[in-house]
Amino acid sequence: MSIQEQTHNKLYDNLNDVSEIALQNLDPMHVLASGLDYFLTQTYVSAPNVLAAETLINASVERAKEENNG
């Protein structure tokens, strides 16, 4: 397994761990909204421009819709 795959898996493991901790004391919708807010903000901060950020966000939303709604 490549270092990129290992890092990707570790990221997801850490996100799952912190979500479990948060869900012990916070409403699930609050945890989800907080995660979305955090990563949307990071997308705008990290992208080279607003168009690139919104392209990534829109592609991610469409992928999630397709994967979860058929």
Image (cartoon, rainbow, N blue to C red):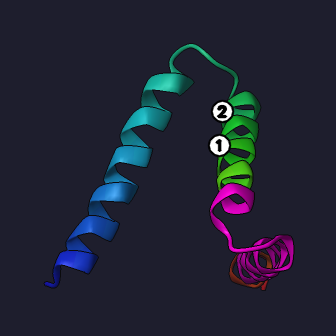
Give the answer, above or below, for where 55 lies relative to 24. Answer: below
Task: Using the rendered view, name the quadrant where residue 27 is placed.
Answer: top right
Task: Using the rendered view, name the quadrant where residue 43 is placed.
Answer: bottom right
Total numbered badges shown on the rendered structure: 2
Q: Residue at x 75, y 43 (%)?
A: 37
Give the answer, above or below, for where 13 lies relative to 2. Answer: above
Q: Which portion, as a residue range, is magenta?
A: 43-64
10 Å crowding of disc 1: few (<14), some (14-19), many (20+): some
Q: Residue at x 43, y 34 (%)?
A: 18
Inspect the image, locate mark 2, and give the three-letter code of the amino acid beneath it: Val
Q: Say left or right for 30 vs 31.
A: right
Q: Residue at x 76, y 39 (%)?
A: 33
Give the answer, above or below, for where 61 lies relative to 25. Answer: below
Q: Of helix, strand and loop, which mostly describes the magenta segment? A: helix
Q: Quadrant of the C terminus?
A: bottom right
Q: Quadrant of the N terminus?
A: bottom left
- Front-lying residue, 6 or 67: 6
Give the SS element for disc 1.
Answer: helix
Farthest residue toward the front?
48
Residue 66 image point, x, y percent = 76, 85
Give the SS element for disc 2.
Answer: helix
Answer whether labels 2 and 1 touch (C-beta < 8 Å): yes
Q: Say left or right for 35 vs 62.
A: left
Q: Say left or right for 11 vs 50.
A: left
Q: Reply yes or no: does residue 34 show up in magenta.
A: no
Residue 58 image point, x, y percent = 83, 77
Label for residue 48? none
Residue at which label 2 appears: 31
